[in-house]
Amino acid sequence: MFPLVPQVRDTIRRHGMLDGGETVVVAVSGGADSTALLRSLAGLRGELGVHLRVAHFNHQLRDDAAADALFVGEMARDLGLPYHEGGASARVEAARARRSVEDAARRLRYAFLVSVASAATRGVVATGHTLDEQAETVLMRVLRGAGPWGLSGIRPVRTHGGVRVIRPLIDTPRASVEAALRAEGLTWREDPTNRDETLLRNRVRRVLLPALQGYNPDVRGALARLAAVIRDEQEALDQAAAPRVDAVLACNGAGVRVALAPFAALPAALQRRALREAVRRLRGNLEGVAFVHLEGTRHVALAGRLGAVAELPGGLRAVRREQVLELTAGGDPPRHRVHRAGP
């Protein structure tokens, strides 16, 4: 039995990740984390009653990326699992969409994974995010001034494009992942960009977290626990606040309207929740919406001139009208200055 199976089994059960009967599309880059994820799920597939498929996406960022695909394909064949491969240039997509290469790569990868899962019976995507990545994510969001939703970190279970995405290694430290692979005599692919300290995540991983270990040897566990606590608090508060949030929102054919008089009477925390819910109703998700975007939009709602506009991620616009803030996907050019909600 692969050494991580008991930990992964516990994480899947504790977070209600799988019910049985799903087709789990395992995202495998060839790195240590995704290799260990695939081996763990392969050891549990009979017990969990799930079908596995292996999916690999080539972002075309490195000369040796094709070797990663060959490595993953061979691993899938060794395990007797169907293999799906996709690819596109993250640099080209970044230039086209005016995003960072890292963000473009993530969007392309998830679009591919969701497409594979959507074509399967009860498709679910599994990714190899570990406890270390949870800690890194929380620290990165602290540095960027995130609000409580950001500090809740990587969700063990979320929905992307209508497909459930699960993180069965989210409670497992990276050191345990590599130790398990070595104990089984298994190899993995190393991505040289993980050593590039011009990338924020790598500086956090290689410089900041080791420094913080001098203050708390279990700093990664502490940050992961912080994320879990904040996530639970936020979900409970969202549920309690739902009636007051619903009272200020109205959907129409063009978008979502926020009634400004009752909105202004809400505490600031509920105003932010109302704006988040307005975006969710309009877009179906909150991808890319950060604290700074909500604050910019809230400022337009409470202090903006008539016709003032806040632009949000995903092409959304919030326009200040006489008695409402009107959120739409695009729309007419603004009558007054545009407030860009975010950097």
Image (cartoon, rainbow, N blue to C red):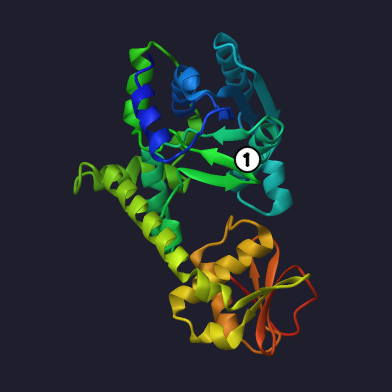
- Along the horizontal axis of the image, is 86 left or right of 227? right
Q: Is residue 212 above or below residue 331?
A: above
- The quadrant holding residue 314 is bottom right
> Label 1's element?
helix
- Name the spot of residue 50 as percent of width and height, x first: 55, 24
Viewer-proximal residue, 7 or 312? 7
> What residue would you read off at disc 1?
110
- Name the spot of residue 201 as percent of width and height, x first: 44, 45
- Along the horizontal axis of the image, is 208 left or right of 67? left
Residue located 58% across and 30% down the image: 22
The quadrant of the image that shows the C terminus is bottom right
- Name the spot of residue 271 as percent of width and height, x first: 51, 76
- Name the spot of residue 10 as percent of width and height, x first: 36, 32
Query: What's the residue type where badge 1 is placed?
Result: Tyr
Q: Is residue 335 above or below residue 143?
A: below
Residue located 58% across and 58% down the image: 286
Residue 273 seen: yes
Residue located 30% across and 43% down the image: 220
User: Outermost residue, right direction?
Assistant: 332
Number of dots carrying numbers: 1
The quadrant of the image that shows the N terminus is top left
* Residue density around tag 1, few if under 14, some if 14–19, many if 20 or more, within 10 Å: some
- Along the horizontal axis of the image, is 56 left or right of 138? right
Q: Is residue 25 above or below residue 323?
A: above
- The quadrant holding residue 335 is bottom right
Viewer-proximal residue, 6 or 173? 6
Viewer-proximal residue, 119 or 302? 119
